[in-house]
Amino acid sequence: MSDSFLLQPVPNNIHDLPLSEGLPFTSVQGTDNRNQSIRHRDICWLITMWPDGTISRGTGFVIAPRLVVTAAHVVFKSERRWRALSVQVVPNADGATAVHWPLGSYSAREVRLPIEYSRDNDINFDYAAVVMPDYSMINAMPNLQFWTLTEAPTIEYRIPIKVHEHEICMYSYPGDKARGTQWYSPPEKIVMLPNPRFAHKLDTEDGSSGAPLHWHRGDGSFNVIGIHSGTSDNRDYNIGIRITEPIRRQIMGNWNPDA
């Protein structure tokens, strides 16, 4: 089941508003090996405005002409039952101001998310999408190869925790780096894969939430098997929402305005 709500236009002063306080959602795992060797134009910096006039920042990725996927907590504060008022989408940002936004910035029209998250605060459903009002953003990205949501490989969950052979990597906008800059987290093996979430050791920080967890095959494919969601209670590993076939159908079918 799905929930949805409309957004207001992004105010001109959104970047002057104070940052919202909240719980940490991500963490660097050991040595920080993030770098800027690779940047994707369809990875988006998201700036969310909340009812109290504060903002928070996250990551999203373009999955269809008018659909950007992210984490649900980027656009809905479950602890306060707050819906986002506005969401600014900046694809391929490379800095905090418009001069560093080669593809422009855009105001999202609508949020779509699982009702299990908005109603029940079920962290297993921490994924969402923002719908763009028109094709202006995608028209700025000619010949774009969309990310593909791919059902994550089925791996038996065992104790003790097993490190699996599948590697993932990530592109995101972490809050501990220069504001509005995209960073690449090189491949790391999946630590465990209990359905519907899995653990990983990619380096992330607040602002990385909503980033695609890309199945690193080394063949140039764009297969997303998870959406970065948060960190464990003791911050010794990070967590992604596993793409299953029902989640893929919900996003690409029910939520996609061009389906």
Image: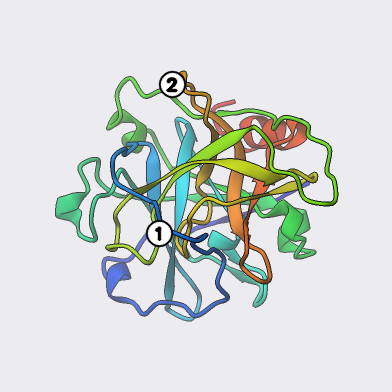
Q: Residue at x 55, y 38 (%)?
A: 168
Quarter-of-image position of residue 31:
bottom left
240 or 188: nearer the viewer: 188
| SS state under label 1 | loop
Question: Which amino acid does the dot numbered 1 rest on?
Answer: Pro
In this view, the residue in front, 108 or 229, is 229
Query: Could you tell me residue 45's position as x and y percent?
Result: 37, 52
User: Counting other residues with Cα less than 10 Å from the Cα at mark 2, is it few (<14), some (14-19), or many (20 or more)?
Assistant: few
Give amino acid for label 2.
Gly
Rendering coords of residue 69 (x, y %) = 53, 43
Q: Position of residue 196 (x, y in %)?
A: 77, 46
Question: With respect to residue 127, does 207 lie above or below?
Answer: below
Residue at the image position 43 percent from the left and 50 percent from the top: 108
Whether residue 75 can be seen here: no
Q: First in sequence, mark 1 or 2: give its number.
A: 1
Q: Secondary structure at mark 2?
A: loop
**Up-down: is 3 above or below 39?**
below
Using the image, determine if residue 85 lies above or below residue 19.
above
In the image, which disc is placed on residue 220?
2
Way the structure is coloured: rainbow
The residues tagged by marks 1 and 2 sit, at their Cα atoms, a distance apart of 24 Å
- Kindly tell me whether residue 55 is visible in this rendering: yes
Q: Position of residue 143 (x, y in %)?
A: 33, 19
Q: Quadrant of the C terminus?
A: top right
Q: Which residue is outermost to the left?
A: 99
> Which residue is located at x 24 percent, y 45 percent?
104
Name the residue that disc number 1 marks. Answer: 174
**CB contact under 8 Å: marks 1 and 2:** no
Q: Nearer the viewer, residue 51 or 17?
A: 17
